[in-house]
Image (tube, rainbow, N blue to C red):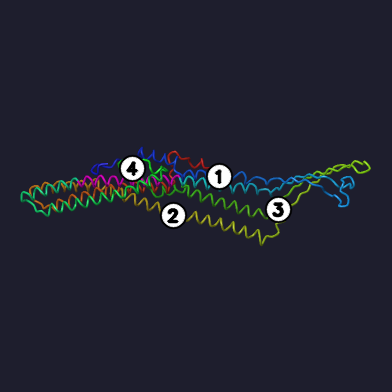
Amino acid sequence: MSPGAPATLNANKSALLTSLIAEALENNPEIQAALKAREAASQRIAPAAALDDPVLEAGVINAPLASSPFNREDMTMKMIGLSQRLPFPGKRDLRGAVAAKDAEGVGYGYQETLNRVVREIKIAYFHLGLTLERTRIVEKNKLILEDLRHIAERHYGVGLGSQADALKAQTQVSRIVDELLSLARERPTTEADLIRALGRNANVAVPVPEPLQLEEESLSLESLRATALAQRPQLLALQSIVSREEKALDLARKNYYPDFDVRLAYGQRDKLLDGTRQPDMVTLTVAVNLPVWRESKLEPRVAEALAKRDQAQSLYEAQRNEVTASLRQQIALAEQNLKSARLYQTAILPQARLTVESALAAYRVNRVDFLTLLDSQMTVFNYEIGLATAIAGYNKALAEIDLLIGKPSTGAPNTAELQ
């Protein structure tokens, strides 16, 4: 974008930035790790609600020590049995619900990771764009200052100016060169941030951002806060944790009720020595555990679950307040940068450029000194840098707001797909 031209208002993100975000959603290793964590958590739901494995047993019962053959005692038999533990009604459902809430929270964590990586890409993209724009402005200003130096030298040559004017111009050119060196040192760091967020190999080419643009949006604190509370994955994950701890508390209270061990056994008996046939036998038993250690075992677990639920609720409320405060801060920052950019475009820069043109015309006829002309040009330079910085700052603030409200990323699954 030319510093003198109004910034383009565009409701859509640039095509390049959109493609970079789509690339990161496919390649970024943090996103892939979060996706695998979500898949793993979803696989823990069914086992949590499943019954314990049944127990198969086989052996000999009621065999007297004095006589090993099976036909000497009528109660000696070969036995095979199967037993199964059955939790008290409601426990399995609660265990499954706890695991489901865990998986839901991990799913929201995956969505938060997506949004955070998108924010990192936008910040690095706009910062790199600002670096390139500043470099372009500095290089343009370097050429202008060199032209002014030549004018000052010609004035000195014909006796209309002093040698100090040319030296002042050369000093400013040297300062501009130093600024270019500083920008050259800064650029690789910003490029590295963008490459890392994209998940690219460090040896591949670095994307070149499109010219900085103002993508003006309506910013209402109450509206954005309501959106954040409704769809910010981080807040939804904390809500899932609160719900999870409530289910865990219900499960801890269910432990006051016993579980059941059902056992079915079949006993095969041989004929007696006199040939008498003996009928086989079936055994059915039901055993229950006795949760009698309430004070030392059960009540502390209930108290622990209650404390963890309250902790989760407090963490949610604290994060909700943090999101509101951050939204307020970023909205103020965005509005400030937008107003600054508009002021630079409509008033400050046009007036400053007119001042330079007037000073240059007056200097050519020796009506103003060279220092006035030089100061006027440096003022335009600083204002152009200020405009680029304000545009980049505005777009960075919007990127932060998108993260805070949980704005879904293009190509990413929506909240409903996380269930």
Considering only order in the chain, which callout, 3 or 1, is on the residue closer to the N terminus? 1
Camera-nearest residue between 244 and 128: 128
Horizontal side of 174 relative to 297 (left or right) equals: left
Which residue carries the number 2 mark? 322
The mark closer to the camera, 4 or 1, is: 1
Q: Which x, y percent locates residue 386? A: 26, 50
Which residue bears the numbered disc 3? 258
N-terminal of the two: label 4 or label 3?
4
Residue at x 33% of width, y 43% of height: 216
Q: Are marks 1 and 3 in contact (CB under 8 Å)?
A: no
Which numbered marker is on residue 40? 1
Q: Which residue is more in the foreground, 139 or 48? A: 139
Helix, strand or loop at label 3? It is loop
Residue 381 in the image: state x and y as whole percent: 22, 49
**Residue 336 placement, left or right of 159:** right
Q: Earlier in the sequence, mark 4 or mark 1?
A: 1
Q: Which amino acid type is shown beneath numbered disc 4? A: Glu
Q: Residue at x 62, y 58 (%)?
A: 301
In the image, the segment drawn in magenta is 114-142
Q: Residues within 10 Å of mark 1 (few under 14, many from 20)?
A: few
Disc 2 from disc 3: Cα separation: 44 Å
The Cα atoms of the two marked residues, 4 and 1, are separated by 39 Å
Report crowding for label 2: few under 14, some 14 to 19, many 20 or more residues within 10 A (C-alpha).
Answer: few
Mark 4 → mark 2, Cα distance in angstroms = 26 Å
Distance from the alpha carbon under mark 4 to that under mark 3: 63 Å
Characterize the magenta stretch by its predominant secondary structure.
helix
In reply to whether residue 357 is colored magenta, the answer given is no
Q: Position of residue 359 (x, y in %)?
A: 13, 49
